[in-house]
Amino acid sequence: MPTVEKKNKKIAIPFSGKVVFLNVDEVMYCKSDGNYTTIYMKDGKSYVYSKKIKDVYELFNIDDIIRVHQSYLVNMNYVKEYVKNEGYYLIIENNTTVPVSKSNRAYILEAIKKL
C-alpha cells in the first residue's frame, strides 16, 4: 500500500521583483518592523515582506506558528529553550533570542505542552 506524503503548505510572497514560495514548515520566526515583516527561514535566508505581522500571522494559518510578542511570530517546532528568568524569552534553534510578552506566557506554556 503506498504511503501518503504530507504536503508542505506554502505561502507566496512578493520579494525583489518576483514571487517567492515559502514552505510554512521551514519558517523559524518572523519579526515585525512597522508595516514590514521579516521572515526568517531554517536555511538562514530571510525575506522582507511588505505586510504587518498581523497579516502574516493570518496568512500562515497553522497551529505551530504562534504570536509570542507584539513584534514576533515563532514556529514552536524550532524553539530550543523557554527562559523564565531575567524576563521571559525563547531561544530559537539558530540561537536567536525572542522576547515573550506577559500576556502570551500562559498561551506559550499551552503550546509547549502540545509539542
Image (tube, grey):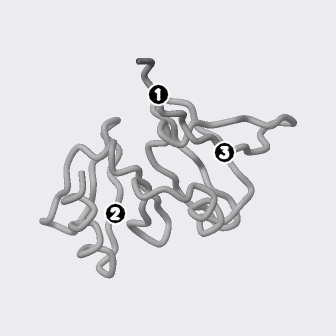
Cα distance between the residues tagged 3 and 2: 25 Å
Q: In the structure shown, which secondary structural element does the residue marked by tag 1 occupy?
A: loop
Q: Residue furthest top?
A: 1
User: Are dots 3 and 2 in contact, CB under 8 Å?
Assistant: no
Cα distance between the residues tagged 2 and 1: 38 Å
- The quarter of the picture where the N terminus appears is top left
* In front of the other: 59 or 96: 59
Q: Position of residue 95 (x, y in %)?
A: 30, 39
Kind of residue indicated by mark 3: Ile
Circle on res. 99: 2
In the image, taking residue 100 as reference, residue 81 lies left or right, namely left
**Residue pointed to by mark 1:** 4
Q: Residues within 10 Å of mark 3 (few under 14, many from 20)?
A: some
Q: Residue furthest right?
A: 17
Kind of residue indicated by mark 1: Val
Name the residue located 46 percent from the left edge and 61 percent from the top edge. Answer: 72
Query: Which of labels 3 and 1 is toward the front?
Result: 1
Q: In the structure shown, which secondary structural element does the residue marked by tag 3 occupy?
A: strand
Q: Position of residue 115 (x, y in %)?
A: 24, 51
Cα distance between the residues tagged 3 and 1: 22 Å
Name the residue located 42 percent from the left edge and 22 percent from the top edge. Answer: 3
The quarter holding residue 11 reads top right
Query: Which of labels 2 and 1 is toward the front?
Result: 1
